[in-house]
Each structure stands twice: as structure tokens, then as C-alpha cells.
Amino acid sequence: MNISHTIDIIVKEVRCPNIATSPGLILSTNETKMNTKVVFSCNNGNDLIGGPVEAVCYPSGSWSSPIPACMNITCPEIIEPNNSELIVRMSGIVDNKIYSGTKAYFSCSPGFYLEGTLSSEATCLRSGKWSIEPMPKCLPISCSSPENPESGFVNTGGKKFFHTGDMVKFRCKSGYMMEGQPVSRCNERGDWSNLAPTCVRACTYPGSVIGGTISDVKFYYKVGDTVSFKCSSEGLVLKGAKMLECLGAGVWSSSVPNCSPPNSNKA
């Protein structure tokens, strides 16, 4: 007697569970077949949390990763302090909510400047925090930055804005002398205590005469100033120009004379 056995093999298509979407979650496809890749995104500026941006249906019938959800990540409102001169302008607000990616731009009322940050804008991050903390504040500008005098410089100490009591110093280029005050102070009225000085062409001290004297000793001499020389001993004779004049180019009209015995050949 012949006995035969029959085995029926049933091949069933592998599918993963349908993805239960949370509010705002967008799927690139609703297909659930094996090897299907689904890419996730959110609408209305929401952010994906709890999983990666894609999942693949494995042969085991399960998804490769947890299904993410969409969440509104917001940053706290920027509160302007009372009596503050800070001006905040927002860009990207949706339904009066500050979602990630929203930008805040800061400025100050006239007469004030931003202090406390290197940037005049902040971005709402996906962490729910602003990109800069603490927020900037506005401080009063008491005095404007003084300009460099012609042929001179002003030392501001690296500052662009000045408060009451701040001081600046002026100096002139080589070959120039200063007419005016070298230091100025920012007053409560918002002006400077002294006008910027003037730098004018000048001659430096011409030098001393051995055995003689000079009529006027100064660090600088104005153009047109003159100095005269004489010998301090009756046994010496002045040889050279008796008087020198400071010329417009900042040089003396002649070299310094010398005092020598009458019979000396030194001129």
C-alpha cells in the first residue's frame, strides 16, 4: 500500500504595522511592505522628537526605529524691562507663538547703544532657548566719539561710546606740536570738556651750543619762531648763524652755530 503525504507551504507577504500618526506628523508614504522606507516630517514648524527622521520595515515585520512625534518647541517671550530703551522686533512668529527658528532683532532708542552681546539678533533654538543669554540691554550714550585732529590721533581706549567721566587723550604726529588741551572729559551734558586740539607744523629743540647759550628752550617751536645764540665766554667767538628760524617744513633755517677761539678754523 502506497502512502503519500502532502505539505502545503503558504507564503505570506511581510508587512509592518500601520503607523499611528500623531498630530502634525507627515509620512512620505503609507506603504507598510517589507523594505519600505518612510520619511517623517512635521507641519506648521513643529519639530520631530522621540525618533529619527526615517524608519524601514524589516523582514521581521517591525519598524527599524521608534516612530517620532511632532511637538511645538517654543522659546520664552522676550520681556522688555520697564522704562527700557530696548526695541525688540520679532520675525517668524506663528499664531503668536515663538517656535524654533524665530528670530529676534534688537536695537535701542536714539541716544542709547546695545551692551552685553556681540550680536544684535537672537534665534530660538530647538532646545527651547535663545541663542544668546543674557539678553542685551541699552545704555545711554553721553558723548559721541571725537574725531582725530588733522595730523594727529585720539586715544579712545578702544571705546566707541562714552559715558560721563570717560576721558580721551590726543597726540600729534612726529614733526607737529599740539595747540590746545591733550585731554578731554565727557560731561553730563553729553559734550566734551575741551575741544579737540590742533596739530601744527613745528621744529624740535635745535640743540645746545658748547660754550654758549640759546635764547629759548622748548620741546617744540612754531613755524616762524626764532632762537638766537651767544657765547658765554668773552674768549670765544660765535661762528655760524646767530639766529635760526623754524621754517614751514618743520626744519630750522640753518644748523646750530658753535663757540670757538678767535683763531680756530672751526666754523
Image: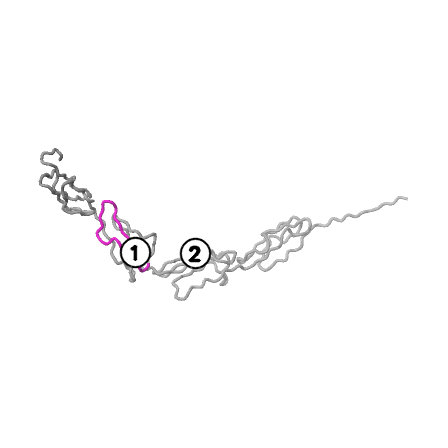
The single residue placed furthest to the bottom in the displayed view is 82
| Circle on res. 53 | none
Image check: 238 left or right of 6?
left
Residue at 28%, 59% in the rendered image: 191
Q: How many marks?
A: 2
Q: Nearer the viewer, residue 253 or 84?
A: 253
Disc 2: which residue: 121
Q: Quadrant of the C terminus?
A: top left
Residue 29, magenta (yes or no): no
Identified at 38% across, 63% down, the residue is 85
- Residue at horizontal 61 percent and vertical 58 percent from the top: 21
Q: Secondary structure at mark 1?
A: strand
Q: Amino acid at mark 2?
A: Glu
Residue position marked by numbered label 1 in the rendering: 167
Measured from the top left, where is residue 217 in percent x and y? 17, 47
The kind of residue tagged 1 is Met
Q: Are marks 2 and 1 in contact (CB under 8 Å)?
A: no
In the displayed structure, 64 sits above or below 241; it is below
Binning the other alpha carbons within 10 Å of mark 1 as few (below 14), some (14 to 19) or many (20 upward) gives some
User: Which region of the structure is painted magenta?
Assistant: 163-184
Sequence-first tag of 2 and 1: 2
